[in-house]
Image (cartoon, grey):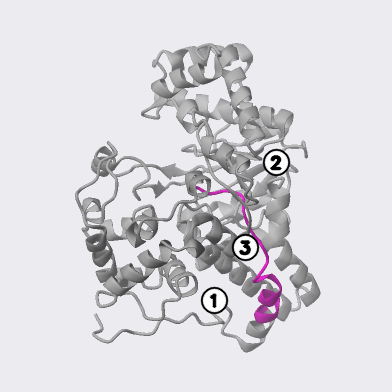
Amino acid sequence: MNATPQPLTLHEDRLFPSDPTQREIARRLYAQVAHLPIVSPHGHTDPAWFAGNAAFANATELLLVPDHYVFRMLHSQGIALDALGITRRDGSRANVDPRAAWRLFAENFHLFRGTPSSMWLNHVFHDVFGLRTKLDAGTADDYYDRITAALQTPQFLPRALFERFNIEVIATTESPLDPLEHHATIRDSGWNGRVITAYRPDPVVDPEHEEFAASLERFGEITGEDVHSWDGYLRAHRQRRAFFASMGATSTDHGHPTAATANLSTDESRRLFDKVVRGAASATEAELFRAQILTEMAAMSLDDGLVLQIHPGCFRNHNAGLFERHGRDKGADIPLRTEYVHALKPMLDRFGNDPRLTVILFTLDESTYSRELGPLAGHYPSLFLGPAWWFHDAPEGMWRFREQTLSTAGFYNTIGFNDDTRAFLSIPARHDVARRIDCAFLAKLVAEHRMDEDEAMEVATDLAYRLPKQAYRL
């Protein structure tokens, strides 16, 4: 590590083309979109932050503990999550001084060189906290002290940061079992910040979820429906969806292992559901049940107008030992090969041609961009492509997404950008990266005389602002 602190700077041309002609075009495009409001229609920030508007505790609790992008890299280098103060599965934590955890992070910050995490974090350090030296072992305490002190001031309270970041709307993601009390508090507080929810029913639609049986019981208690009957179960979903919509939801979200859909008859669905609630469903039948649920959710969307998001193709909690100790969402999720053409056909046979339905598809399998997803979205009126997601939410991944879907889906069968993050302070950085990459991509098209610059200006604005609002019915 360097003994003398090194300067931290953000180059004004970062992520722009090295070709001077394209770079000049990218600069002009970016100038039009850089300061547009942020529309964050899908993510995982905690609504309690905005409801209580309490000060964040310290640098570690805000920037390290919630960020699985960060601690998965540290874990890959043999650093125990307990040493970072990461919550265990039972809700407890190792007795770790947050300053000591921050020092450990700072000593290993070099691991993130060139990664999206480094780019996002340096943006936060520079633009949000005004730090001008790089984070390393020598600056760790100065960082910790300055960030923690800033967090105790009014300018760094959650609502103040929301307004400072120019966020027009942000969506959180909650289970059907959530009472949405924080959203009610926000709504009743008189604050003008728009924080809405999204309906994520995974715990009550996935028979292989470790909490499925208990969640189903709670689902019935909340709704008053007989959720052990197929008809009552569907009524319970409709009831909770209506409640979520009343609290601002405009979308549902489904994190299934695959993109499989099904089109079973009512009698077939009832027989399958009976096996599911008895705990007698095989792995194949559990997959069929999830597939049928996606089609049922599409049908409900035609009634209540909620946008259907599908986030498939992830082997979640791959590290069994880590899952046993620390639980879900601890950086051990791994992308899978995912098939869409056959998987989506049952649902598309019923609803694919209905423009009243909006289905937003995501993938962790980039090989499907040009072969499957682009052609599907470029044909079916109900289908749109979500942006490069999760492991591919990076400059290279964003570029590959545009490059491989443009010829079949164009720009207008995509939905712009959503940050899909629980790292609140990184939201401006993530949107800035997306806007810069889109401007760089458009600049190349203009320089190659495939698009006029005035058209590129309009597309850049649409991708940064109009398309996400339109797609998510905001």
Closer to the camera in the image, 77 or 106: 106
Residue at the location (63% across, 36% down)?
247
Under tag 1, what secondary structure?
loop
Region of the chain picked out in magenta, as a range: 26-44
Q: Nearer the viewer, mark 3 or mark 1?
A: 3
Name the secondary structure under disc 2. loop
Point out which mark residue 358 bears. Answer: 2
Q: State the CA–CA distance, disc 2 to disc 3.
A: 27 Å
Badge 2 or badge 3: first in the primary sequence: 3
Taking the spot 37% from the left edge, 53% from the top edge, the residue there is 68
Q: Which residue is labeled 1 in the image?
A: 15
The residue that mark 3 highlights is 166
> Where's residue 262, x and y in %?
59, 27
Residue 378 placement, left or right of 310: right
Residue 434 relative to residue 65: left or right: right
Q: Is residue 82 above or below residue 18?
A: above
**Disc 3 from disc 1: Cα separation:** 22 Å
Residue 328 shows in this picture? yes
